[in-house]
Amino acid sequence: MNSDKITKTVLFSVSILILMLAAGMLYSLVGGAIPAFKEFGLKFIFSGEWNPTEGEEKYGALPFIVGTLMTSFGALILCLPLSFSTSLFLGEYFRGTRVARILGLLVDLLAGIPSIVYGLWGFYVLRPALIEIGFGGRGFGIFTAALILAVMIIPYATSLSNEIISMVPNDLKEAAYSLGATRLEVITSVTIPNARSGIVAGYILAFGRALGETMAVTMLIGNTNQIPTSFFGTGNTMASVIANQFGEADGLKLSSLIAIGLLLFLITGIINAAGKLIIKKMN
Amino acid sequence: MKSTFAWKDHTSRRLLKDKAVLVGVVVLSLITISPIVLIISKLVAEGYQQISLDFLIKNTPDTFEAMTAVANGEKIPGGIANGIVGTLLMVTLASAIAIPIGVLTGIYLYENQGKFMANLTRNISDILQGVPSIVLGLISYLWVVKHITNGFSALAGSVSLAIMMLPMIVRSTEETLKMIPQTLKEAALALGVPYHKVILKVLVPTGFSGLSTGILLGISRILGETAPLLLTALGSSIINLDITQPTSAVPLLIWEFYNDPNMIGLIWSSSLLLMAIVLILNIVSKQIAGKRN
C-alpha cells in the first residue's frame, strides 16, 4: 500500500515538473526581455529600426517579424501542391501498396535531414541553380529561404493529411462511385470535404514548424536587418537574427534578442495550440 | 441521337480530367521526394573521399594547416573526433535527463486518462514540442550558461537538447501504453503485484519496442541540431569531456567549416557522416515499429 503511494507521488511530481518547465521557460524569457521592453516599450514590436551602434542603440523587431511571416507563408504556398499531391498519392490513389510504403518512407526521411544539411544543399546547389536562371542578389533572399523551408515542412504537412485522408470511410466513397462518379469526383466531393479540418490542421502545424526553422534559413536569407521590400529581396527571420547576432551580444542587444525569442515562443505556441485544437474538435 | 453524343462527350471529358489529375499527382509526388535523392547523392559524391580512419579519430585542423594542405593540393589533414565525442557526450547526457522524465510522465498520462492534471500536462507537452529549437537554446543559455556553469558548456547544450527530446518521449510512451491490453495490467494487479512493479515488469517490457522507437526518433532528431548548440555549447577545437566546459559537436563543426573558406573540404564528409547516422537511426526505429504492428 505504501509503495503504491510512493509510485503515484513520483509520477505526479514528474508531470508537475513538465508544467514547471513550461512556466520557467516563459518566466525566464519574460525576465530576459524586460530591459528591451522597458527601453523601447511596445514600439519594440512595431519599430523597423535595428541599430547596434553604441550610444545610439535602437532595436525593433518588425523587420524580423515581417521576414518570418513572408518566408513561412511563402514556404506554405510552395509546399502546398507538392505535399497535397503526396497525401493523395499515399492516402487515396496508392493506399496500402508497396509503392506508397516506399514513398512514405522517403517523405519521412525528409524530416530526418538536419536543418544545417538543408542549408548546405541550398547554399551549394539550389542557390547556384537560381543564379543560373537569372536570380539577382547572388541567389540569397526570402524566396530562396522559402523554397528550402517548403521542402523541410513537406513531411509535417503530408503525414497528418495523409492519415486523415486514408481514414475517410469507404462506404461514403463507394456510394459516390456507385452513382457513377470518377475517382477525381470522389476526391473533390467526398474525400476532401470529409478530411478538410484535418488537412487544415496539418498545414497549420507545418506553418508553425516553418516559423522557427533556423539554420537553413540563416544560410540562405541574406541576413539584412531592414524590413524586406519584396519576396525576392534579402531579409532576416526572428530565428535567424538570434542565431546571427547572438555571438556578439550583451546588454540591451542581448535583451532585444531574448525579446524576439519570447515573441517567437508566443507566436509558435498560439499556432500550435490552434492546430491541436482543430484536431481535438475533429475527434 | 444527339443527346447520346453529348453524353459521350461529357463523360470522356470527365474521364480525361480524372486521368490528368492522376498524372499530376504522381508527377508532383515524385518531385516531392526528389530532394532527398539529390541531397544524399550530393553528400556521397562530395564527401566520401575525405572519410578515412583519421577523419574519425583526429581533431579538427586549424585554418592555417588546412590552407597549406589545400594550397599544396593535398587532402585536409585531421578529422572531426572532437565533434564526434562532443555529440556523443551531449546526446547521452540529454537522453539521461529526458528519457526517465519523459517515460514517467507518459506513464502518468496513461494512468490518469481524462483527468484535469493529465490533460493539462499533455497539452503543455504538446505545445513544448512546437517550441523552436533556437528558443530552447536561449532558455538553456539563461538557465545553465548564466547561472550554473557560468560559461558555455556541454551541460548547457545537453539541457537544450533534453527539453527538445522530452515531449517526443512523453507522447510516444503514452501512445505505446495505450495499445497494451488492459487485461495484462489487471492480471498483474489481481496477483497483488505492487504498482511500481506492474510498471517495471509489465508495462515497460511489453511496450519496450514502442518506447525504443520513440527514443531513437528523439535521438535522431537532436543529433543534427545546430541552432541551440550555437548559444550553449559554443564549440571547441579539442576533445572535451568536462561537462562544464565548451564542447564541440558534429553539426557545430559543419557550421564552423561553412564559415571558414579553408575548411570547405571537410563540410561534405562531416555532413555525410551525420546524415548516415541520422538515417540509420530513423530506419532502425521504423523497423522496430513495423515489426510490432
Image (tube, coloured by chain):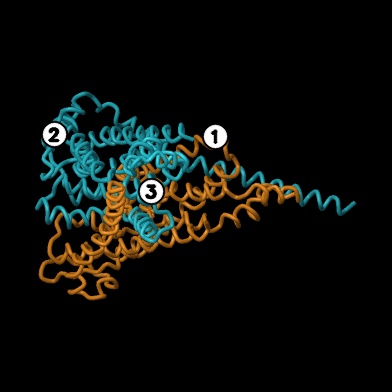
Chain colours: A orange, B cyan
Q: Residues within 10 Å of mark 1 (few under 14, many from 20)?
A: few
Q: In this view, does B291 lie to the left or right of B126?
A: right
Amino acid type, mark 1: Val
Q: Mark 1 points at which residue?
A: A99
**Mark 1 residue element:** helix
B290 to A187, vertically: above or below: above
**Mark 3 residue element:** helix
What x and y, as percent, mark residue B123?
38, 58
Q: Nearer the viewer, residue B69 or A211?
A: A211
What x and y, as percent, mark residue A112?
37, 41
Q: Which chain carries label 1?
A: A
Amino acid type, mark 3: Arg
Residue A52 in which image quadrant: bottom left
**Mark 2 residue element:** loop
Q: Which chain carries label 3?
A: B
Q: Residue B171 carries which label?
A: 3
- Give the residue at x 14% y 53%: B145
Q: Mark 2 points at which residue?
A: B61
Q: Are marks 1 and 2 on the same chain?
A: no
